Image (cartoon, coloured by chain):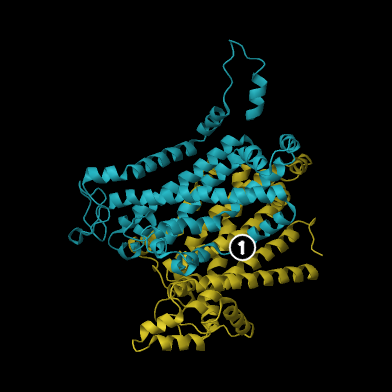
Chain colours: A yellow, B cyan
Amino acid sequence: MTRFLSIRFLQASVVVLVMSFVVYGLIGLMPGDPIDIMLSGDPNMTSEDAARLRAVYGLDQPLLNRYLSWLGNALAGDFGYSRQHHQPVMTIVLPRLLNTLYLMICAFLISVAVAIPAGVYAARHPRSLVDQAINLFCFAGISLPVFFLALLLIIFFAVVLGVLPAGGMKTVGESSFGDRLRYMVLPVATLTIANIAQVTRYVRSGMIEVLREDYIRTARAKGADENRVVWRHALRNAMIPTVTIMALECGTLLSGALITETMFSYLGMGKLIFDSILANDFNVALIGLLFACSVTLVLNLIADLLYAALDPRISYR
Amino acid sequence: MVSVISTETASRPMQDASMPPPLSPALLVWRRFKRHKAALIGAGVLIFLALLAILAPLIAGWRGQDHEVVDLFNRFQPVSAAHPLGTDDLGRDLMLRLIYGGRISLFVGLVTACLTASIGTVIGLVSGWYGGRIDAFLMRFCDGWISLPLLPVLIVLAAVDPTKVGLPMAIAKSPDLSLYRIVLIIALVAWTTSARLVRGVTLTLKTRDFVQAAVAQGASTARILFVHILPNALSPILVAATLASGNIILLESTLSFLGLGIQPPVASWGNILTNAQEIIWSQPMQAIYPGILIFATVISLNFVGDGLQDAFDPRTEGR
């Protein structure tokens, strides 16, 4: 187990390292560099000044040298300053990451809580009216653009009914937990609806597959209670492939979070990444993207561990 | 349900005047596809939208309107005979802009899906056929690629300055750049699904007798891959490409909505919604029409893909 974990941890570190280089290179390809931005802010600067500044900040160095010096600083815990917020990158990123995690965890838990019963029911009664309704809902869920879903929710709940805020994090001057929650309802609902559809589809197809197995017939034949057959014999086996897909699906949740946060002005990672890319805030964009990659990697690892927990035949030793 | 091959071989020896002629595989697929009502409706919706997109210039000529000319005196006109859906914030006919937007969105969906399927097919064929180190390398690369957060990466790619990657000015300043760019960057991130699929099919096919026979006859690798294996992998590729084109249209509209995809004044369903959040208080319907069109297109594509899957492979029906 320890061996498995350490190997996976090593692999993940290598992947993050490679990604940091790729992302560093990509960000360098975005329009404008810091000196250009300084130049446009100060009409008195000459091109000699610009060249000197480039040398001071090391921007005249080749890509690999710049990357290595960034990496050296990053490993020593110095991720640079945000151009937009005039604060060290980590002071900005960490609270944002926490906000996004709240959003994602709520959406994930609610969608699993709804999707598993729905998927199991649909699989037990294939081609029934309810199954067809669930199927239609799933198709609708995966076909609806997240930003449009957010717009619809805003139009309905904020414009027409006026019961929920259209965006933001909290009412000015109010700091109660209930107020925070009110602002989270619509973003969480947006993310959840988009996610339920996917998870339900996986649970349903996994269950249909498993319910055809011989051991299910055996369990029924020996007189096991139908609920026991479905929830203990079948679901546990159906969850093995589903869990992996669900963990990967969290990557989609992360992309969804980017749009949702932008739509609702929710101060999370996704909005931070989007805003910093648009504002040429390179240091923040870089760390934001790396965090997003790392979250996906960690989720993959969790999926592998759950795999072993659900299926005793698999063990990591 | 009998499979395509067994129907053909079983009915041939018994053929006589009293028997109907055997069904062609295409006809069988069509018969099964027809049974999937949602897929049939989806196909109808897609054909209708495609016709509108193709006929867009004719419709514009017939209505005597231009979808890009700004007319500030006619902002937010209500619904009328001249403007069946009213006008937008710059006084342009919303219906015409939606029709032209469909031209872009459907074009991006179709072209990118073809490009994605081609890249994926080549990588999948090579990976599955050669196996060993090449396969291991390509599949690990694929895994790494999938673990990238899709949308953030697309946003970075969409923000890349074309002159910094060495594109000549003529292309970098071309008004169609945003169109080419979106096709290219989506294809760049979306090829993994079809690559894995084709690799899987290649792995199973390469042990089959007809492929072994081709090898024994000394057929070149290219001939085996493209003449013997590829045709047998076409139906899953077609299904995957149909489903992928729905996702591609979603990604395109999202990027255009965020202002990073198709650039105005060219209309796309996504960028018509760009400033929708400011107008929902006064003109909520303006935000709803383009969204419904995206939704209708994508759900139709998903249903058609599902129907094709059932039609090609009856064993998967109802799963």
Residue A276: percent from left, percent from top: 46, 75
In the rendered image, the residue lying farthest to the right is A317
Closer to us: B27 or A181? B27
Question: Which of the 4 quarters of the picture holds residue A226?
Answer: top right
Give the residue at x 46% y 50%. B109
Q: Quadrant of residue B314?
A: top right
Query: Circle 1 marks a residue in which chain?
Result: B
| Residue A276 appears in the picture as rendered | yes
Q: Position of residue B237 (x, y in %)?
A: 58, 44
Q: Decide: is A262 above or below B267.
A: below
Using a 10 Å C-alpha cutoff, classify the residue at mark 1 as few (fewer than 14 neighbours), some (14 to 19) or many (20 or more).
some
Q: Residue furthest left?
A: B73
Q: Residue at x 75, y 40 (%)?
A: B207
Q: How many marks?
A: 1
Most foreground residue, B240 or B311: B240
Return the residue nearer the eye: B242 or A266: B242
- Secondary structure under tag 1 reads loop
Q: Tell me which amino acid carries mark 1.
A: Ser
Left or right relative to A300: residue B88: left
Look at mark 1 in the image and give the residue it sits on.
B147
Q: Quadrant of the C terminus of chain A?
A: bottom right
Is the residue A265 above or below the residue A217 in the image?
Answer: below
Tell me which residue sits at (61%, 49%) in the image.
B122
Task: Answer with left or right where residue A98 lies relative to residue A214.
Answer: left
Q: Is residue A153 visible?
A: no
| Residue A97 position within the rendered picture, expressed as x and y whole percent measured from the top left | 55, 74
- As drawn, which residue projects farthest toward the top? B17
Where, quadrant-wise, is the N terminus of chain A in this rendering?
bottom right
Percent x, y of residue B135: 70, 54
